[in-house]
Structures are given as C-alpha cells and as structure tokens.
Image: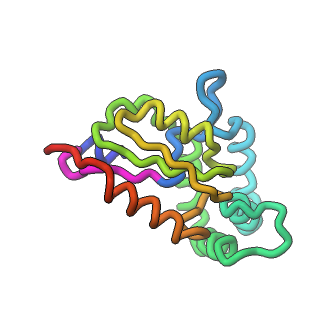
C-alpha cells in the first residue's frame, strides 16, 4: 500500500490479505484488535522466552488457539518464527505492532481488494470494514476462514478470490 502511494504508476490494483493499518485500538472510531498493554506484553514475552512467544503466537495467527493438535499451518508458522533471528523479529514486531497508517489510506489511488478473514485474532472484521470505508475504490470480501494466514491454511480459497477480483476489477488508466 505504501509503495503504491510512493510510486502509483507501478501499480494497477492492490490485493490486501488480512491487512491492518494499525493493530492498536483507538476507540471509539477504530478497533484494531489490541490494547497497548497487550502488545507490550507480547514484546516482553519475546524478550524473555522467544521460543515460547513463537509457540504462543503461531496457533493464534493460524486460528487454532486452544486446539489440541497443531495443523501444518501452525507448525510452519512456529518453525518460521523460531528460525528467524530473535533480534530482527523483535524489531519487526515492535515496528508492526505500533505502526499507524490510517492517515495514509486516503492517499491510495489504486483500487484494492481487501480480503478479510471471518475470524482473525490479529486483524478483526472491524479492521477490514474500516479499510473498505477509507480506501477509495475498494472491494471488501470476507472469506470464511479462521486465522490470519489464509494464504497458508486455505490457499485455494484465497487464490480463487484473488483471481476472481483480477478477472472482474477494472484497471486504472495510467
């Protein structure tokens, strides 16, 4: 999205999968899903026990928190988190968790497909609706997916939604 603002001529349309312009709640107008204390707690857990953080976050992101058996998606996420340098992951997490790009939304000049998962602990449906309301020319499609990583857990559904959008959306004139 930010790249399309900086260099709009390089983009025709955008596909935003489970996007969030801001993970923090800013009531009453914006519910990003988290209170500051929640995110600070996740960062503390990263600092104290990185493997424990990865094992906690993977099922939350995959939508299987509380499930007895880990799916392939949860295992892949956990392995990916665990194989990432903890210092790099910490900087990425802090930057991502506390970024606020809501003011950038009106600057997007390209049509967007917002793919929202029906149940997503990291980017709740209110975020998808907010994006749809604030991105000119956007299309909101709610996928019947639980979790934040539908591209991993339900790739067939995600690919079908993207193909359908690209087939029917009108490109922007240069």
| Residue 93, visible in the rendered structure | yes
Q: How many numbered circles does the render carry?
A: 0
Which residue is found at the position 39% from the left and 59% from the top? 164
Name the foreground residue: 157 vs 37. 157
Taking depth in this image into account, of 90 and 170 the one nearest to the observer is 170
Range covered by the magenta-colored residues: 8-16
Q: Quadrant of residue 53?
A: bottom right
* Rendered location of residue 140, percent (x, y): 48, 44
Q: Is residue 108 left or right of residue 70?
A: left
Residue 86: x percent and y percent?
A: 61, 64
Above or below, comparing residue 84 to residue 21 in the picture: below
Residue 16 spot, x, y in % from top left: 44, 51
Quadrant position of the C terminus in the picture: top left
- Residue 103 vs 8, above or below: the answer is above
Residue at (71, 60) in percent of width and height: 63
Locate residue 141 relative to residue 2 in the image: left or right: right
Residue at image position (84%, 62%) is: 66
């Amino acid at each position: 999205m930010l790249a399309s603002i900086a260099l709009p001529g390089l983009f025709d349309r955008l596909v935003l999968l489970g996007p969030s312009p801001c993970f923090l709640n800013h009531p009453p107008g914006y519910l990003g899903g988290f209170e500051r204390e929640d995110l600070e707690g996740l960062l503390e857990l990263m600092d104290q026990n990185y493997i424990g953080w990865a094992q906690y976050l993977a099922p939350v992101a995959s939508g299987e928190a509380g499930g007895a058996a880990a799916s392939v998606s949860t295992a892949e996420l956990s392995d990916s988190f665990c194989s990432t340098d903890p210092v790099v992951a910490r900087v990425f997490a802090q930057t991502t968790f506390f970024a606020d790009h809501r003011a950038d939304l009106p600057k997007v000049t390209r049509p967007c497909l917002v793919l929202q998962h029906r149940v997503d602990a990291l980017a709740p449906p209110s975020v998808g609706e907010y994006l749809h309301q604030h991105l000119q020319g956007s299309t909101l499609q709610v996928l019947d997916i639980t979790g934040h990583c539908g591209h991993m857990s339900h790739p067939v559904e995600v690919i079908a939604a993207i193909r359908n959008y690209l087939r029917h959306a009108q490109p922007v004139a240069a």
